[in-house]
Image (cartoon, coloured by chain):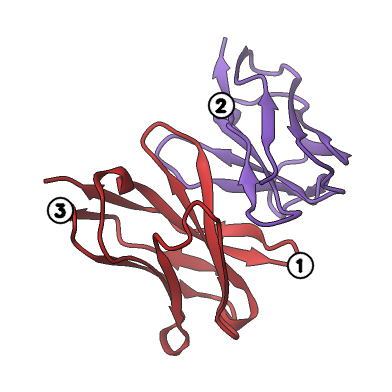
Amino acid sequence: DIQMTQSPSSLSASVRDRVTITCRASQSLSSYLNWYQQKPGKAPKLLIYAASNLQSGVPSRFSGSGSGTDFTLTISSLQPEDFATYYCQQSHSTPWTFGQGTKVEIK
Amino acid sequence: EVQLVQPGAELKKPGESLKISCKTSGYTFTNYWIGWVRQMPGKGLEWMGIIYPGDSDTMYSPSFQGQVTISVDKSINTAYLQWSSLKASDTAIYYCARGFGVEKVLDYWGQGTLVTVSS
């Protein structure tokens, strides 16, 4: 199985901060990397697919980049509704696997 | 509007069987994959498997192969996840989600079913 490692596991940030979360894969994914946001008690929500494609309806402050084994999710200006846990997920080869999650908390 | 609707909760005893549903609407059921994802209490997301309703082509994670069965009923646009003999360690929230594209990206999600297995 492809192992996905996110860093950091958690972070504290303030509203309007720029936030960056990284995801590293144990082997090359090309661009088959997706990002999800999950709020407490809610289902995950797709933010970014194929490394850099913004899902319809997702605010443009979210962006994704990277290819191969190293990927980044960036929130350009953190908003109150962005405090949540973020997961990367590879869809290069089965079984699809998720990172362990990054919890973004209010500073 | 695309919707995936799941029952909110199930309470079962160890050894019992269970089949949970994921009823879809708002799109052509047979043209998209349906995946299942587990989230154990306080933990992260785990991909269990995925099925293509058009031809019932199914792929399982090795971690779940033989432990669960994924199926569909095309006549009512519904996918299922079932267990023949539940264990306490199956206690978790189970999400279904629609998969699109070659990469089967999970774009729409059900609200999740909390399965509690306790004697």
Q: Are marks 1 and 2 in contact (CB under 8 Å)?
A: no
Chain A color in figure: purple
- From the image, which quarter does the C terminus of chain A lie in? top right
Name the element at disc 1: loop
Identify the mark nearer the N-term, 3 or 1. 3
Question: Disc 3 marks which residue?
Answer: B13
Looking at the rendered image, the disc whose residue lies closer to the viewer, 1 or 2, is: 1
How far is mark 1 from mark 2, CA to CA? 31 Å
Q: Is residue B88 left or right of residue A86?
A: left
Chain B color in figure: red
**Picture coordinates of residue B26, whole percent (x, y):** 54, 75
Looking at the rendered image, the disc whose residue lies closer to the viewer, 2 or 3, is: 3
**Picture coordinates of residue A54, whole percent (x, y):** 77, 48
Quadrant for residue A41, please give it. top left
Name the element at disc 3: loop
Quadrant for residue A73, please give it. top right
Give the residue furthest to the left.
B119
